[in-house]
Image (spheres, grey):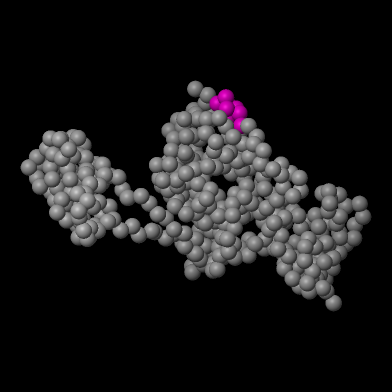
Amino acid sequence: MPNAYLQGIQGAFDNQAQIRNDVHVVAINWFVNRCPLVTRVPRLPAGSTTFTMVNRNFRARSAQLAAAVAVGDGNITLTDASSFMVGDVLELPSGERVEINTFDPNLNNVNTVAIRRAAEGTTASTAASGATVTLIGNSRTGGEINQNGVAFKPTGVAQFCQTWQHPVQVSGSLQGSLGYQARSGLNTPFEHSKMDALQNLMDDMEYSSYYGRGEDPAVASRPKQKGLRTLLGSNVVTAPTNAGAYKPTDLIRDTLEKCRVGGGEPDVLIVSTNFMTGLATWGHAAQRVSAGSTVFGTPIDVFEAPFLGGVSLIEAPLLKPFTAICLTSSEVRMRMKRNEFWSPRGSRGDAFEGDWIAEGALEVENQGHHAWVEGITAFSAT
């Protein structure tokens, strides 16, 4: 009778045990450099296959005029005034500043607002329909009561837990072979095949966390997660300026600047392997940072480049060439229904069988705090 309480890393003939063998701690150490995203971000449980991620945004600093403005007009009509309040000062393209007066556009759910013209010593002027007005800031007397602020409603984004499964099956004849060439520490063909399948499982988790487009379990029998490229939406740059002669300033523009403008605090840059060549081309060869080692004694790869201002640089072998991902790391995590585990089937006929299984999805809060760039074709030092 098999031991129903067997735990830890199982040997070749332990696959009759009834308990599932959770190996995610081993996996995140073993594959920390090959799969840096899914092995290094925190993990939290997911209670269901579908969960919601939250986006919060600063209020808009600009809006467009829905109608032309004449010098004598006492109001302006905007395409969307919902982010403005009484007392807000707006600047027209001419430099004239106007103050929203008398009522709260957000409270009244209207886009035409009464204004005081020529505020702050400016001169009343015209403005064309479609022109951009800029929010300077709110002003109050300090004595107002019952004033409504802008009501922000965080938006939710659905994410779907994906199940990854890699079966292992080794015949009894192969298992009985002598002198089988296996990795160090692996004694049998079955153990070797298990490690190969575990690598495939981790690769699938990593790659789909980058490139998954997502598929709702309500319409598909096999749900798929949304990867970073899909989740980051408007912060994905696919045709960067200077793509054929990409420089450090271009990288900063497409990643760090986008994150910071969106309100993020980026601290990690995950790059494809050929970016290491790019850094050398730029004269900023990556410098290894001491980040400790795994439980197996393997150094954890983390780099820095002088022009990135202390942002950690991580090489990701599975990213497509010429790809860089900038993250505010405190807002990225894996939500797991089931961490990586070995599910033994036992023996069937003359074969030993089992499956590596994991179920979860990437969670990203505030997509505007992160950025993705691809479409680069060559690096240039000048």
Q: Which residues are magenta?
A: 278-286
Q: Outermost residue, bottom direction?
A: 1
Q: Is residue 162 visible?
A: no
Q: Position of residue 20 (x, y in %)?
A: 72, 68
Q: Position of residue 366 (x, y in %)?
A: 44, 52
**Residue found 40% across the figure and 54% down from its top:** 56
**Residue 276 shown left or right of residue 187 in the figure:** left
For residue 303, above or below residue 167: above
Q: Outermost residue, right direction?
A: 178
In the picture, which quadrant includes the N terminus?
bottom right
Q: Position of residue 174 (x, y in %)?
A: 86, 59
**Residue found 83% across the figure and 74% down from its top:** 2
**Residue 26 shown left or right of residue 241 in the figure:** right
**Residue 293 shown left or right of residue 250 in the figure:** right
**Residue found 55% across the figure and 63% down from its top:** 161
Which of 285/120 is in front? Answer: 120
Which of 225/334 is in front? Answer: 334
